[in-house]
């Protein structure tokens, strides 16, 4: 796991404010972590949940998987650049789309195939065919933007 502070430092490095050049104050780091919380909430709102730990502690673990650390740093760098008077480079601007796509691709869920209720169970299945002649609709519970939860 990567700490929130490491992600903020990575984002500052992407806009040309690496730790060897720039030493951010605790207030600036706190504002950057709050901005990262806002980015995670925005992604959470559109259904991209990566396990981010909300909260503004500097040394706290981010909760992000390794595949999501760099995309989060890129998105944070784009948000922080105007606050530090920096312009976004064309390379960073091009990597924003790749970062969002990387977050979305790892979020895809392959739907489970369900047989229709008009399909006969048949003799070869191990279900109790004496009571059920056709496949039944699976029990599901709607969870909002994520889809359905199988019971």
Image: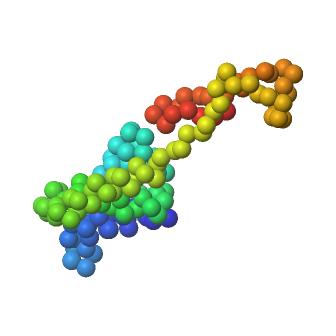
Looking at the image, residue 21 sits to the left or right of residue 107; the answer is: left
Can the viewer see residue 88?
Answer: yes
Q: Percent position (x, y) of residue 103?
A: 40, 53
Q: Percent position (x, y) of residue 9?
A: 32, 68
Dividing the picture into quarters, in which one does residue 112 lie?
top right
Q: Nearer the viewer, residue 102 or 116?
A: 116
Q: Residue at x 67, y 21 (%)?
A: 118
Dividing the picture into quarters, in which one does residue 91 lie?
bottom left
Which residue reaches farthest bottom? 20
Q: Nearer the viewer, residue 52 or 144?
A: 144
Looking at the image, residue 20 sits to the left or right of residue 69; the answer is: left
Q: Is residue 147 above or below residue 129?
A: below
**Which scheme is used to colour this image of the protein?**
rainbow
* The C terminus - image quarter: top right
Q: Residue at x 23, y 59 (%)?
A: 94
Q: Is residue 120 above or below residue 62?
A: above
Q: Is residue 9 above or below residue 117?
A: below
Q: Residue at x 39, y 56 (%)?
A: 102
Question: Number of callouts in the render?
Answer: 0
Can the viewer see residue 26?
Answer: no
Q: Residue at x 85, y 27 (%)?
A: 128
Q: Percent position (x, y) of residue 31?
A: 28, 55
């Amino acid at each position: 796991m990567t700490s929130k502070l490491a992600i903020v430092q990575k984002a500052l490095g992407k806009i040309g404010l690496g730790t060897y050049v720039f030493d951010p104050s605790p207030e600036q780091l706190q504002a950057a972590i709050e901005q990262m919380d806002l980015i995670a909430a925005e992604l959470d709102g559109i259904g991209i949940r990566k396990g981010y730990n909300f909260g503004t502690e500097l040394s706290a673990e981010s909760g992000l998987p390794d595949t999501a650390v760099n995309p989060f740093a890129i998105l944070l760098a784009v948000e922080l650049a105007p606050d530090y008077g920096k312009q976004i480079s064309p390379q960073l601007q091009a990597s924003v789309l790749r970062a969002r796509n990387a977050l979305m691709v790892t979020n895809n869920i392959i739907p489970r195939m369900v047989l229709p209720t008009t399909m006969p169970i048949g003799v070869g299945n191990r279900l109790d065919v004496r009571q059920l002649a056709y496949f039944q609709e699976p029990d599901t519970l709607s969870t909002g933007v994520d889809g359905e939860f199988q019971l």
